[in-house]
Image: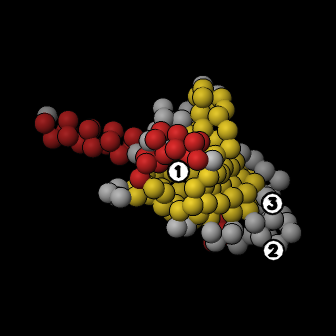
Amino acid sequence: MKTLFLILIMTMSSLAHSAQYTLREGKLHKGGVASVEVLPHESLFIVKMDYEVFKRSWVPAPPEVLKGDTVLELPTQFKDERGYLELETLGSMSIPDAELKFIRRTNFGKYHDAYEALVLPKNGKTKIEVIYHPNVPGAGWAQVRITFISNVPLLNGYQAIADLKN
């Protein structure tokens, strides 16, 4: 019984550090799935995003771009609301791999007074907008909106929007 209880606690703990998302349909894709997991680290807030995009049949995209993962390393204060409060006060902050910008406070579904923030990775390939609320599991992101920056005209400015599954 004690072992079963420990397994249940560990499972619930790991679920609290991850969240599942549904990708909205877009012009080039029929939808998709994504997950966001907070990886353990003492001095950073490391977020791993896994995704799988379901492309439209006529889109000539190779399979390796439709499924994958990316890792964001943010300052530790972004593990909770403190980082977003600081970002709101400062307006923007520079970190080693990205520029962070506060956009606004917003209401998103049942999440009131949420934070909308922009992450501009220094690799210049994407812009990532997140809506953060402390009551959302995992990284606290109710929505993730990725805008692609590409030399390919069809992909430049293309957006993929991932909403938290209820």
Left or right of residue 112, residue 150 in this image: right
Q: Residue at x 45, y 56 (%)?
A: 75
Residue at the farthest left position: 2
Q: Earlier in the sequence, mark 2 or mark 3?
A: 2
Q: CA distance from mark 2 to mark 1?
A: 27 Å
Q: CA distance from mark 2 to mark 3?
A: 10 Å
Looking at the picture, the colour scheme in use is secondary structure
Q: Residue at x 73, y 62 (%)?
A: 148
- Mark 3 and mark 2 in contact (Cβ < 8 Å)? no
Q: Amino acid at mark 1?
A: Ser
Q: Residue 35, which numbered label?
A: 1
Residue at the farthest right position: 153
Question: Of helix, strand and loop, which one carries label 1?
Answer: strand
Splitting the image into 4 quarters, where does residue 132 fall? top right
Q: Residue 151, which numbered label?
A: 2
Left or right of residue 13, residue 46 in this image: right
Q: CA distance from mark 3 to mark 1?
A: 23 Å
Question: Of helix, strand and loop, which one carries label 3?
Answer: loop
Query: Which one is in front in this view, the residue at disc 3 or the one at disc 1?
Result: 3
Q: Nearer the viewer, residue 87 or 41?
A: 87
Q: Residue at x 68, y 44 (%)?
A: 103
Dot 1 surroundings within 10 Å: few (below 14), some, or many (20 or more)? some
Could you say where residue 49 lies in the image, as x and y percent from the top left?
53, 57
One can see residue 15 in this view: yes
Q: Earlier in the sequence, mark 3 or mark 1?
A: 1
